Image (cartoon, rainbow, N blue to C red):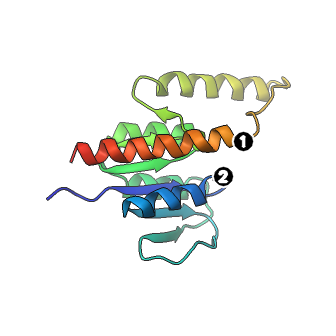
């Protein structure tokens, strides 16, 4: 029997918690939120929260530990996405609905590094665009698609 599909959410500052819950429950999937602090989540046996110590990469480390080839990870953290893909995690999505893949992660990591270097050098670079309704809709579609693909690959 195939391992169950699980959704793992890098929950600190995640703007799509409610949407992820709604999709997970619609598909009858467990969803685990990993955070550095307590979050108020709806009560359901499929929804759980793991609060990790506040050290720098504790949440990322726990997500990588829990994730497997049947997991769908939701994160804005490009380096966490890279770690998950290196481990063979099933799907890695951003809250804006962008799928991180083996083909795209190298460019994302390089861009992140360049922007970090520019900021460290004092350059005024803008941050990401504000989260929009379109982003929320793209996330819902991407998560639904990732679940359907995972079910097909079972």
In this picture, residue 41 sits left or right of residue 25: right
Graded by Cα atoms within 10 Å as few (under 14), some (14 to 19) or many (20 or more), the crowding at tag 2 reads some
Residues 62 and 31: in front is: 31
Picture quadrant of residue 30: bottom left
Q: Quadrant of the N terminus?
A: bottom left
**Image spot of residue 12 (x, y percent):** 63, 57
For the point 63% across and 70% down, the residue is 39
Q: Residue furthest left?
A: 1
Residue 54, given in percent of the width and then of the height, sits at 63, 63
**Residue drawn at (60%, 39%), measured in percent from left and top?**
96
Work out whether residue 96 or residue 64 is closer to the camera in this orientation and state it: 96
Residue 35 image label: none
Q: Which residue is mark 2?
A: 15
Using the image, determine if residue 37 lies above or below residue 140: below
Residue 79 can be seen in this image: yes
Give residue 7's position: percent from left, percent from top.
42, 56
**Please, what secondary structure does the residue beneath circle 2 have?**
loop
Q: Residues within 10 Å of mark 1 (few under 14, many from 20)?
A: few
| Residue in the picture at 51% in, 60% down | 22
Measure the C-alpha gap from mark 1 to mark 2: 8 Å
Between residue 98 and residue 73, name the one nearer to us. 98
Q: Is residue 9 left or right of residue 15?
A: left
SS of the residue at dot 1? loop
Q: Residue at x 55, y 46 (%)?
A: 75
- Are discs 1 and 2 less than 8 Å apart at CB? yes
Residue in the foreground of this view, choosing between 35 and 121: 35
Asked if residue 77 shows in the view, the reply is no
Q: Considering only order in the chain, which callout, 2 or 1, is on the residue closer to the N terminus? A: 2
Q: Is residue 28 above or below residue 72?
A: below
Query: Residue 76 at x, y = what percent?
Result: 59, 43
- The label on residue 131 is 1
């Amino acid at each position: 029997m195939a391992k169950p599909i699980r959704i793992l959410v890098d929950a600190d500052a995640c703007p799509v918690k409610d949407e992820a819950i709604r999709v997970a429950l619609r598909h009858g999937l467990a969803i685990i939120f990993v955070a550095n602090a307590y979050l108020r989540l709806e009560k359901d046996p499929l929804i759980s929260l793991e609060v990790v110590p506040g050290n720098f990469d504790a949440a990322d480390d726990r997500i990588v530990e829990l994730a497997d080839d049947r997991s769908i990870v939701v994160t804005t953290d490009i380096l966490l996405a890279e770690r998950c893909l290196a481990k063979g995690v099933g799907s890695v999505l951003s809250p804006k609905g962008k799928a991180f893949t083996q083909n795209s992660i190298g460019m994302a990591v390089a861009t992140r590094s360049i922007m970090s270097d520019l900021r460290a050098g004092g350059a005024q670079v803008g941050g990401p665009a504000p989260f929009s309704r379109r982003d929320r809709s793209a996330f819902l579609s991407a998560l639904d698609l990732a679940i359907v693909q995972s079910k097909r690959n079972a």
